[in-house]
Image (cartoon, rainbow, N blue to C red):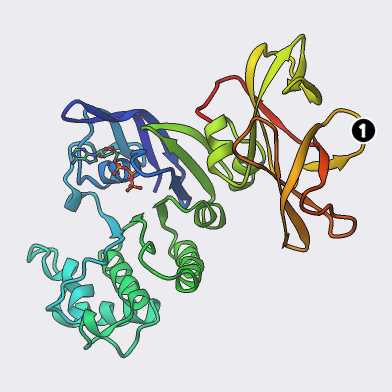
Amino acid sequence: MGITLQGITKGFRGFQALHGIDLEARPGEFLALLGPSGSGKTTLLRIIAGLEFADQGQVAFDGEDVGHLAAAQRQVGFVFQQYALFRHMTVADNIAFGLTVKKRRERPAKAEIAARVAELLDLVQLSGLGKRYPAQLSGGQRQRVALARALAVQPRILLLDEPFGALDAKVRKDLRRWLRELHDRMGLTSIFVTHDQEEALELADRVVVMDHGVIEQIAEPQTIYDEPASAFVFDFVGESNRLPVTVSGGRVAFAGQPLDVDGSGLTGEAQLFFRPHDARIVTDGAAFPAVVTLARPKNGAIRLEAKVEGRTVPVEIDVPLAGAPAVGDTIRVAPTRTRLFAQPSAA
Ligand SMILES: Nc1ncnc2c1ncn2[C@@H]1O[C@H](COP(=O)(O)OP(=O)(O)OP(=O)(O)O)[C@@H](O)[C@H]1O
């Protein structure tokens, strides 16, 4: 089932949380909404779920406007960070909840519900734990119960709001792989909110990067990383260095030092971005000087932090183990792969 959002806006008492969001999730797609705290991810997810209503704009499932439908009528499954299981109910009763509260006409027979619960317990690999209470489960197990409960009503859309946020790194990693498999196997269309870029890049077919209630970029993970559409995306996703540069006649200079960067199309002040592994140390040519303040092993290379005169934030670069400079050395840094953005952002 495809999801289409058009021109979604939402304000809370004078505060504009979403500014005209256009977004499409293709049938079977797994989308991640990625952005800093307060960027509007949860609000957008709640509008899709029908837990919140947009001030303007349209929400459609498979081309059909669902804007007027309440959450229960939209047939979406959702899972939140706080597992929100009913503490006084067994695991099995928690999973069955969505089915038992259906109107009598639509409610499956008791035996059918029991069979569905057993199937779901099996699916989330918790067979045999149906009689336990939530307090008798680990965090990861509780989250899988929450997922089974969301799936009980056989949704075609699954919405997840930081579902693994409260779990430790290892459990989190295992669960998200497992969730991806489940999504594929069940043919769901899923939207996942996270502020963890690794999670978004690893799990999603496409990543939607949000900031201040707008979408900065929608693209496949590799594109988000390799071709960030804005200074914000470059900064937010992956490690990066940012230097204030001046552009004149297509030539780019940092602190008076010309760099080997094409500045055509821009003029005046700009922001130059590069990743730590996209720079080399050179002895002459276009480069800027820096003094090494820290050198530590990282992923089979050496990560250097180097102080640039007049800058408080050090530049980070990765250099080969062999011949790596030492702390205190003055080096010349030549960025090899860069992006230039016109808008000045706060340093
Ligand atoms: N019910 C509400 N009343 C007033 N303001 C709200 C309400 N819900 C959200 N907001 C505001 O809207 C903005 C977006 O919130 P939202 O929860 O969507 O952000 P988020 O990107 O999901 O953040 P987080 O990662 O911290 O959950 C925030 O500034 C928030 O304070």
Picture quadrant where residue 338 is located = top right
- Which residue is found at the position 60% from the left and 47% from the top? 238
Q: Which residue is mark 1?
A: 284
Q: Quadrant of ligand 1?
A: top left
Q: Residue furthest top?
A: 249
Tell me which amino acid carries mark 1. Asp
Position of residue 78 relative to residue 63, above or below, is below
Binning the other alpha carbons within 10 Å of mark 1 as few (below 14), some (14 to 19) or many (20 upward) gives: few
- Which residue is found at the position 43% from the left and 37% from the top? 210
Position of residue 47 relative to residue 270, above or below, is below
**Pick the front one: 317 or 86:** 317
Residue 281 in percent (x, y) is at: 85, 42
Position of residue 37 relative to residue 87, above or below, is above
Residue 142 in percent (x, y) is at: 30, 75
- Which residue is found at the position 37% from the left and 38% from the top? 39
Residue 26 in percent (x, y) is at: 46, 44
Judge from the rendering whether residue 286 lies leftward or rightward of residue 215; answer left or right: right
**Pick the front one: 78 or 261:** 261
